[in-house]
Image (cartoon, helix red, strand yellow):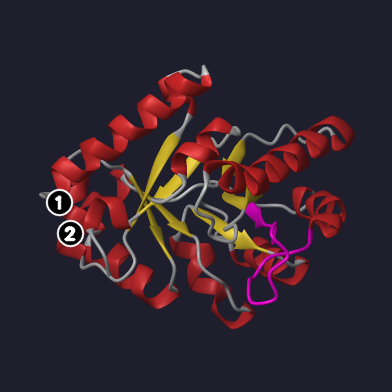
């Protein structure tokens, strides 16, 4: 299937999920995850209407940002993979969003290294919502203190929470961790006056479950580009 057809099919899935949840279609944004796919595939998705793209690996993302520099003012680039402290400088300078902040040191470096002439860097805190030992992310109990500290940093804008739940086959098991992340965001907004607006959750296999529980941004790669 052509990328343009797969992109439209994904948007149709999202619209159907929004309708089933009683939410407006424009309540959920699509982040096209382009990791491991070439810049030519990203350009094809852009030409089909996509504007926000997610990369897992810093250097691969930087290479694509450079390759597609002619489209830079029309695209959003999101880093959604783990970020090491020795790679924060190019990320702070080149990306628009970082979804994978899970400790204060990373946020502090991004804040210090974000060029003054650019808009604030949009930040999501990655939460290990399923408690998996192999997963990145802070524990839910650590989120309030981290959110308070990150929200106070200059040149950053804390937007919300991100999670990659443990895979599950049935809808209710898929929905449970998304529900927990949504509850955590609601508690932050109620107790810390943060006005966070982003729940970055849901991928190709579980976007319906995520949208049912309040996702405002879903990260979809396989359903658009095919298997890696």
Instruction: Mark yes or no: residue 160 visible.
Output: no
Q: Secondary structure at mark 1?
A: helix
Task: Write the residue at 55% across / 37% down.
Answer: 215
Image position, residue 210 (x, y; %): 54, 40
User: Main structural element of the magenta stretch: helix, strand or loop?
Assistant: loop
Q: Residue extending furthest front?
A: 170
Image position, residue 113 (x, y; %): 60, 67
Judging by the rendered image, the residue that carries numbered circle 1 is 44
User: Disc 1 versus disc 2: distance between alpha carbons?
Assistant: 5 Å
Residue 17 falls left or right of residue 225: right
Q: Is residue 75 above or below residue 140?
A: above
> In the picture, which quadrant includes the C terminus?
bottom left
Image position, residue 224 (x, y; %): 25, 51
Task: Write the residue at 74% across / 64% down.
Answer: 138
Q: Secondary structure at mark 2?
A: helix
Q: Nearer the viewer, residue 58 or 131?
A: 131
Residue 71 falls left or right of residue 88: left
User: Total label count?
Assistant: 2
**Magenta extent:** 124-139
Local crowd size for mark 1, using a 10 Å CA cut-off: few (<14), some (14–19), many (≥20)? some
Judging by the rendered image, the residue that carries numbered circle 2 is 41
Image position, residue 16 (x, y; %): 37, 25
Q: Is residue 226 above or below residue 45?
A: below
Find out whether the residues at labels 1 and 2 contact each other: C-beta distance under 8 Å: yes
Q: Is residue 98 above or below residue 105?
A: above
């Amino acid at each position: 299937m052509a990328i343009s057809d797969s992109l439209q099919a994904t948007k149709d899935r999202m619209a159907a999920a929004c309708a089933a949840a009683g939410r407006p279609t424009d309540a959920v944004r699509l982040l096209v995850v382009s990791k491991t796919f070439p810049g030519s595939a990203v350009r094809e998705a852009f030409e089909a209407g996509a504007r926000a793209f997610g990369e897992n690996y810093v250097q691969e993302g930087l290479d694509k940002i450079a390759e597609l520099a002619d489209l830079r003012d029309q695209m959003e680039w999101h880093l959604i993979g783990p970020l090491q402290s020795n790679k924060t400088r190019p990320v702070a300078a080149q990306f628009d969003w970082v979804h994978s902040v899970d400790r204060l040191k990373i946020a502090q470096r991004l804040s210090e290294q974000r060029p003054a002439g650019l808009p604030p860097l949009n930040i999501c805190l990655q939460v290990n919502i399923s408690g998996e030992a192999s997963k990145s992310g802070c524990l839910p109990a650590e989120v309030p203190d981290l959110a308070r500290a990150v929200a106070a940093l200059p040149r950053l804008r804390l937007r919300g929470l991100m999670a990659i739940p443990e895979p599950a086959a049935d809808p209710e098991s898929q929905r449970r961790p998304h529900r927990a992340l949504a509850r955590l965001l609601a508690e932050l907004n109620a107790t810390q006056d943060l006005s966070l607006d982003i729940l970055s959750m849901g991928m190709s296999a579980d976007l319906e479950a995520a949208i049912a529980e309040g996702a405002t941004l879903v990260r979809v790669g396989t359903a658009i580009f095919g298997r890696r």
